[in-house]
Amino acid sequence: MATTASFPTATAFYANLSRSSSGSSLPISIFSTSFSLTPKKPSSHLRNNPYSSSEASQVIPTQTVDDFVSRYGPKEPRRGADILVEALERHGVDTVFAYPGGASVAIHHALTLSSTIRTVLPRHEQGGIFAAEGYARSSGRSGVCISTSGPGATNLVTGLADALFDSIPLVVITGQVPRHMIGLGAFQETPIVEVTRTITKHNYLVMHVEDIPRVIEEAFFLATSGRPGPVLIDVPMDIQQQLVVPDWEQPMKLTGYLSRMPKPPDLSQLEKIVRLISESRKPVLYVGGGCMSSSDELIKFVELTRIPVASTLMGLGAYPCNDDLSLGMLGMHCTVYANYAVDESDLLLAFGVRFDDRVTGKLEGFASRAKIVHIDIDSGEIGNNKTPHVSLCGDIKWALKGMNKILENHQELDFEVWRKELKEKKDKFPLKFKTFGEIIPSQYAIQLVDELSNGNAIITTGVGQHQMWAAQFYKYKKPRQFLTSGGLGAMGFGLPAAIGAVLANPNSIVVDIDGDGSVMMNLQELATIKAENLPVKILILNNQQLGMVLQWEDRFSKGNRAHTFLGDPSKENEIFPDFLCYAKESNIPAKRVSKKEELKSAIHKMLTTPGRVLTC
């Protein structure tokens, strides 16, 4: 068994680590100065903040524009709406998803004056916020969406809850009735701050037009720092119209939040984790979405340790799924060998995860033989579901950097016997599916998308069986390739998320792999795809059923069908609805494939045809 080499002192360790990773020494305090939107003094220390990862989707805060030139003179008064849009421009925002209404029309008028922000008009506010999520999930930058008050704002609720669950950075702006009418039951008034208080990381009701620059600055910082999440800004109509000369030098007022930010990982904690690895015989990495922005460090860690990697749904792609050390996804919809590995392990390295019930099942039986090491940016997740033997609250990127530095001076670890045992399980229990003549298995369709795209496409999904099959049978090579509604499980996510992903990644192939039930929930966004001329590829796996619910009916309700059939009850043998008709009305080239032998050529054509294509 390998033994640990002598460790450097903490001072020397972090000095060397910071020099090797960034070329500058690690700051003792990363929040020692105020923050500003002024282009002459960009918030570079926000952008370079090394302590800003997340349990599920750590990202780098949006960069300010260093050479920004305002449309207005330095002392020229302007409306609150114009200040808001300029603040977005100064933060480098290039795309917003916005649906206008009476309480937000001034913001839309201000947006028409911007030469740097593309305003995308979704056909439903939920489509808009899901598109903003797709933008954020695929790029690592904050997604931005805007709606009016009342029903426009409440249509954003599902997206806010989804972003909070999966730790996705969003800045969501809503119009509100004038200040003097708040609380009087005015037309389209909804107390959206109160409605969303428990499903946002933070929210604001702007009561002074002078606060807009500071509020926007704080919103982007809160959305992207620590454990990312959605921030809502509610802006009354009279604030939008009020004239003022903006002060771009205002410091943020987040003293309490900054004081709670995780500190650099302690060297002794990292040494202890490395010692546990050295002493183990059957270690397993349990990797979640918190590793999305630490993929390079994770890959280096695995190269140094040769420890097998099991991923959560949100963690797919953080470590390449096509690598021999990848065990795929663990949990309810997992590979046999991933669950076997966790069950047999004597050391479980839980990095950027929250021990979700879909992963653990009965908590007392999960990894019952293992010592558990839990590293997470959110102290509220550590010990929340499963008590670890060793815990570290901090940025997984810097924890991995530190452990990698230690491991480079460590004797080689030997887990060959353990890897061979898991290889035997992989060979004995591979992922597979049944075939029935010419009936097209959905898993086969997803395998073909993987093969024909060379595993390089960005995949979005709705929620259901197709979602799990896309997680199992597409081999994600990189982080931010697989975009799905994980914790909330919101149907209708896939199609609008693909819109956001293709706008954030114009040079990538983006494929929405969707189910007929899920895609119907936001099918109106086909019109957005047409109007914006977006090259989204859409693959609908149509079984005329709510397949996941039907599966549960078969397993737990003796096959009793309870409203899971989505076709026309009077014509059960006919396909309904006809997605070709929807595609035709949206001027989207479309093809229906009903024979297995035709599928490969149809998917190849879908992937290689320029522009938007639908295959069902």
Image (tube, rainbow, N blue to C red):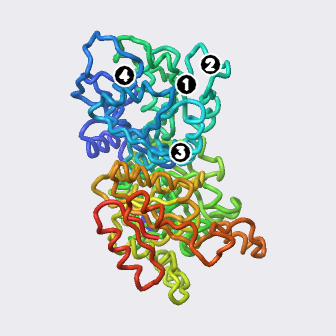
- Mark earlier in primary sequence (3, 4): 4
- Mark earlier in primary sequence (2, 1): 1
Amino acid type at image mark 1: Gln
Q: Residues within 10 Å of mark 1 (few under 14, many from 20)?
A: many
Discs 2, 1 touching: Cβ within 8 Å: yes
Q: Residue at x 45, y 67 (%)?
A: 539
Amino acid type at image mark 4: Asp
Q: Residue at x 35, y 59 (%)?
A: 300
Give the image quarter of residue 307. bottom left
Q: Residue at x 71, y 60 (%)?
A: 364
Relative image position of residue 84 (x, y in whole percent)? 40, 24
Position above or below: 385 against 362: above
Q: CA distance from mark 4 to mark 2?
A: 23 Å
Write down the residue under mark 1: 176
Most foreground residue, 289 or 543: 543
Write down the residue under mark 3: 126
Amino acid type at image mark 3: Gln
Q: Which mark is residue 182?
A: 2
Discs 4, 2 touching: Cβ within 8 Å: no
Disc 4 secondary structure class: helix
Q: Residue at x 27, y 23 (%)?
A: 41
Disc 1 secondary structure class: strand
